[in-house]
Image: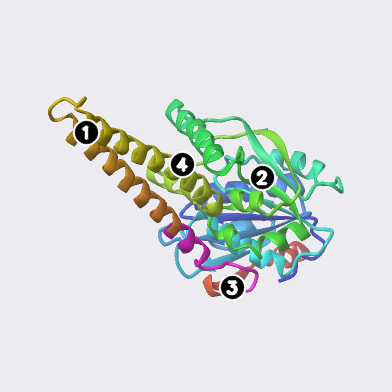
Amino acid sequence: MSFGQHQVIIVTPVYEDVEASSRLFKELSAQFNDDVFVVAVDDGSVKQPLDVSSLEGACIEGVILKLRRNVGHQRAIAIGLGYVSERIQPHQRVVVMDSDGEDLPGTIPELLERLVADDVDVVVAQRKSRVETFRFKAFYAAYKSFFGLMTGRAISFGNFMALKAHAVKRLVAMQELSIHVAGAVLASKLRTETRPLNRGPRYAGQSKMNFVGLALHGFKGLMVFAEDVLVRVGIACAIIATLSVLGAVAAVILKLLGFSTPGWFSVALGILVLMFLQTGALALMTLMLTGVVRGGTVTTAIAYHEFVDYVIETKVSLLARSA
């Protein structure tokens, strides 16, 4: 299905959340009228499968990509962008957003406004305010600091973003996209601008993401820059290993000179040897992780077909004509 003359294409993943996504579709219809096309990716929902009536009830044109199984939030977005990349026209713009209401439809024009500039390929939303608990904010701040330490890059945005057509085509050619969307944008070298926006509350229901899921999502961001992490971890391990060897040599010398107290030498040497072995194991695990990431599944504009069971298209235009 082509996108016709629609100027804005919305890509949103939906998982067991019909109530919230239906409200989103209505707000998008009120915001853009006939100028928006929605690509909703049903991420293997079983209890609440997304139906085309949710789009048609909002009088909005679009498609629902029914996936064969649950693939996760990030890969669902990658699949949606892969579908879009085969049909998008150069003048059209793509907005990636969540379907739960936390990405406010009323702020989309602020993203698109800056995308007009020739020197901007992607406009990302940086959260100006969050409707979150103090614990979440504290862990998120710690994660951003850790991410910067391990990769040498700053990350302050999520999935809510607006992209030009050529930016979409570039991203779907990157294997990192299905791992972590925001990380792929950083790794893509696209010209990115940040726009501070407020984050809204959920339309309905509870978030499907628990603490373990959030932690896993954060570490996937590090996996995008596995080589950078490997280098930094390798340097740190080399420094610690060198200090351990020097400490062990010093302990042996003190023992031979008779300056060590009873039991001190064996304890000190054991701790230093253990530190040396642990740093070697850490470097080896990081190296293996890098190989796994680079040898992983690639979700590109062609490979996304393997995940889609079938596509449901709306008939909003026909219904409007008959009304």
Coordinates of residue 39 in the picture (x, y in percent): 64, 60
Instruction: Report how far apart the C-alphas of labels 2 and 1 lie in the structure.
Output: 79 Å
Kindly identify the residue that appears in the image at 72 percent across and 48 percent down. Answer: 162
Foreground mark, 4 or 2, reads: 4
Foreground mark, 2 or 1, reads: 1
Question: How crowded is the residue under tag 1: few (<14 C-alpha within 10 Å), some, or many (20+)?
Answer: few
In the picture of the structure, the residue carrying the numbered disc 3 is: 303
Kindly identify the residue that appears in the image at 25 percent across and 36 percent down. Answer: 252
Specify the amino acid type for callout 2: Glu
State which quadrant residue 114 falls in: top right
Specify the amino acid type for callout 1: Leu
Direction from residue 116 to residue 49 in the image, left or right: left
Pointer 3 or 1: first along the chain: 1
In the picture of the structure, the residue carrying the numbered disc 4 is: 236
Coordinates of residue 146 in the picture (x, y in percent): 50, 37
Helix, strand or loop at label 4? It is helix
Foreground mark, 1 or 4, reads: 1
In the picture of the structure, the residue carrying the numbered disc 1 is: 256
> In the image, which residues are magenta?
288-302
Tag shown at residue 27: 2
Q: Is residue 207 visible?
A: no
